[in-house]
Image: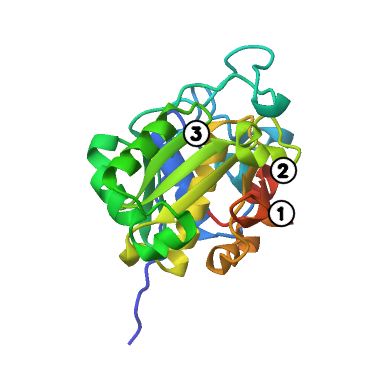
Amino acid sequence: MTLDVAPLIRPAVPSPDDRAAFDRWVEARFAEDRKAEFIDIPAHVIITSRLPGYIDLQDGKRRIHRSGFLQSPEPWLKHPQARYQMAGLVPGPDGRNHPLRPPNPQGQVYERFFADAGISVSFRAVEIAHDLDMFHRWQNDPRVAYFWEEDRSKEDLQAFLEERLADPHNFSVIGEYDGQPVGYFEIYWAREDRLGAYYEAGSWDRGWHGLIGEARALGRARTSAWIRALTHYIFLDCPMTDRVVGEPRVDNAKLLRYADALAYRKIKEFDFPHKRSALMHCDRDDFFGRVAL
């Protein structure tokens, strides 16, 4: 007996004029082959309006590079990209003058599905009235308190969040897996942060602090997913940002073991007044060139 096995039939290529559908098609193609550096648009696909910016027209081909597609904001970024607010710099701490920072967005800012972890990772702006009880519970978990040292009263933590939200160099977000809150993250402009005094901070360098408050959300695949998602969001949010930085405690071995695979490299160790830290750098080209998103 013979069996007729139907060949794999790939869905028809949507028109780039339907941008959302075309983005989904491109992402699916790259997901089929995670090592592919580019795909070509078939010749029969007609483009009648403005091309998506990630389509390369060199040498008569209509080619999409993975690294270019992943830097296109539309599929995942939920707000307009940051832009220059004015020419020149404004005064910063200890003479570290910096660009005028754009206002922080509200609501959901990013969402992307990570097939290798089986979850959709999203970030939204902190809402103190909605998030305080949860944030208080997370910070008073001994596992979190060991690194954050913020195991304080609800009133103290409300003041903590109010201070963060009023600080223009900081953007505080809640991380979610499949729409369920799991962690808290601070995204900061490094030049005016305390870290800016410990290295030659660029005008648009950005860093982050993070915690996963829900123990059920831990695990290697999920941790890799949220680090990739957060780094991806930072680069998408501001096209001027070419470097993401960090300063984890040198004894945070669980976090540091992810560094190389996610394009973070240790520059040096140094001492803050309250901890010994590792200065970590992640460059845009390195991240989009070799990290599997």
Estimate how packed mark 1 is, as few (under 14), some (14 to 19) or many (20 or more) residues with alpha carbons within 10 Å: some
Check disc 1 and report its element: helix, strand or loop.
strand
Estimate how packed mark 2 is, as few (under 14), some (14 to 19) or many (20 or more) residues with alpha carbons within 10 Å: few
Q: Earlier in the sequence, mark 3 or mark 2?
A: 3
Q: Residue 197, relative to residue 149: is it above or below? A: above
Check disc 2 and report its element: helix, strand or loop.
helix
From the top left corner, tell me how far across and down residue 43 is, in percent. 57, 39
- Mark in the foreground, 3 or 1: 1
Name the residue rendered at 35%, 83% in the picture.
2
> Which residue bears the numbered disc 3?
170
Q: How far apart are marks 3 and 1 (CA)?
A: 22 Å
Name the residue rendered at 31%, 38% in the picture.
158
Estimate how packed mark 3 is, as few (under 14), some (14 to 19) or many (20 or more) residues with alpha carbons within 10 Å: many
Q: Earlier in the sequence, mark 2 or mark 1?
A: 2
Residue most extreme to the bottom = 1
> Which residue bears the numbered disc 2?
198
- Please identify the quarter of the rendering in which residue 259 is found: bottom right
Q: What residue type is labelled 2?
A: Tyr
Q: How far apart are marks 3 and 2 (CA)?
A: 18 Å
**Of the pair 95 and 79, the residue shown nearer to us:** 95
